[in-house]
Amino acid sequence: MIDGREQDKRKVLRVTLVADSPEHKSELKNALSGVAEPLLEVLDGGPPQGEAGAPATPADVALVAFNGNEAASLEYLRQQAAQSPRPVVFAVLQERSAGLMKRVIRAGADELFFSPLDTGELTGALLKISEARWRAEHAQGGTIISTVSLSGGCGVTSLCVNLGLAFRRSLDKRVALVDLDLQAGALPVMLNLEPETSILPLTHAERKFDSLLIESVLTRHPSGLYVLAAPKRIEESESVSEATVGATLDVMREMFDFVIVDCGDHISETTVAAWERSEHLFYVLEQSVTSVRAAWRFLDLFERLSLSLLEPRFIVNRCASGHAIDEKRLEETLGREIFAALPRDDRMMERVELEGRDLFELAGTSPLARSYEALARRISPVPEARQTASGGFIARLFSTFGGRS
Ligand SMILES: Nc1ncnc2c1ncn2[C@@H]1O[C@H](COP(=O)(O)OP(=O)(O)OP(=O)(O)O)[C@@H](O)[C@H]1O
Ligand SMILES: [Mg+2]
């Protein structure tokens, strides 16, 4: 058991200050003294002297002032970037010159700040890091994938079911689906299941959530995939709280390789509780103006939620080649990459519904099944953020704090 003090200690971020002169160092120190959260342990990293300036155990963050010897500071950044594990490097520049910014980024800086330092900006960047560490520490076990769309009928439930089946049937993973589209409750129907139980008993469970309790409310599909169904009656969905969803997902992550959550087509506290725990969030859209508009509305709202470590990915469903709204156009309009496109196959989806057999049983080698399988392979076995560990900021956070295997 971790007592309160130990917990606090784990939340402390170690920040090394690196600057040429004592004045510049005290400028950094002063800015950090205004940061109320996260808790910081500030270390003196000396001047930027490469090896000599690097501590034996790298700090979580190195705050490097560029105000004197640029060459030495750049070299310091390069050496920090080559370490494993490495600190997240914040460079503090005196001037907003594009040339300098490029050199600093190329040398390995993760974030740029400008003097005089803004405590608010610094707080935001440090909170991102402490959040990432918290998530990396707590995320032992499987990967949680949330799916959503603000335009109904786009294929959110189909994505959950078929991605889940692809993980299960093609990659032999332990998979569970969670129906958080609480009012529709359509997920088991698509799998031809009639669940006898649902998430409802968890809402008034008095005991601690553990795998035995969760297992008692799951329904098994013949493929070996499990489903946590929505309550039978619409009015019962009201009693499912964000705390129930959070605690349920925390335990399910330990039981399964992949937990896929159907968040339906509206956003609530319960869906946000799932997103806070997700490694991936897939937004499903179609090749239509209304669907793109809805995606825009979603992006606007998502940005205001400030879930800094989760980047929504866009998946086009029922994608038809030759359509006026092609992938390139969607990407231009949204300003986001289309992560995957799933082909339209009305006949196959109709057969799935009518025959009560799943897509992989019926046509495991069809283009539609293959596109779900390709998506599953792209996400498995490690979250994408870690596959590109040498690349982006988030990837570096994962490599800094040690990822999950
Ligand atoms: N790639 C596809 N090609 C053809 N039909 C599809 C495809 N994907 C889904 N469908 C069909 O579209 C319909 C709607 O799909 P689905 O129920 O998955 O959407 P949804 O976004 O979950 O809808 P809702 O908003 O009602 O929850 C279903 O009948 C499904 O069979
Ligand atoms: Mg649905």
Image: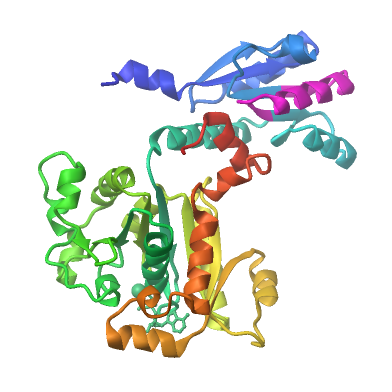
Nearer the observer, 337 or 193: 193
* In the image, residue 92 above or below residue 390: above
Q: How many marks?
A: 0
Residue 95, given in percent of the width and then of the height, sits at: 84, 33
Horizontal side of 240 relative to 398 (left or right) equals left
* In the image, residue 193 above or below residue 110: below
Residue 274, given in percent of the width and then of the height, sits at: 36, 53
Examine the structure image and report whether residue 71 is included in the region drawn in magenta.
yes
Nearer the observer, 151 or 348: 348
Q: Is residue 59 visible?
A: yes
**Ligand 1's quadrant:** bottom left
Q: Give the residue drawn at x 38%, y 54%.
A: 173
Horizontal side of 96 relative to 151 (left or right) equals right
Residue 217, given in percent of the width and then of the height, sits at: 16, 56
Residue 129 occupies quadrant: top right
Nearer the observer, 349 or 136: 349
Examine the structure image and report whether residue 227 is included in the region drawn in magenta.
no
Residue 85, given in percent of the width and then of the height, sits at: 60, 25
Residue 82 occupies quadrant: top right
Q: Residue furthest bottom?
A: 347
Q: Is residue 298 visible?
A: no
* Stretch of the chain drawn in magenta: 64-89
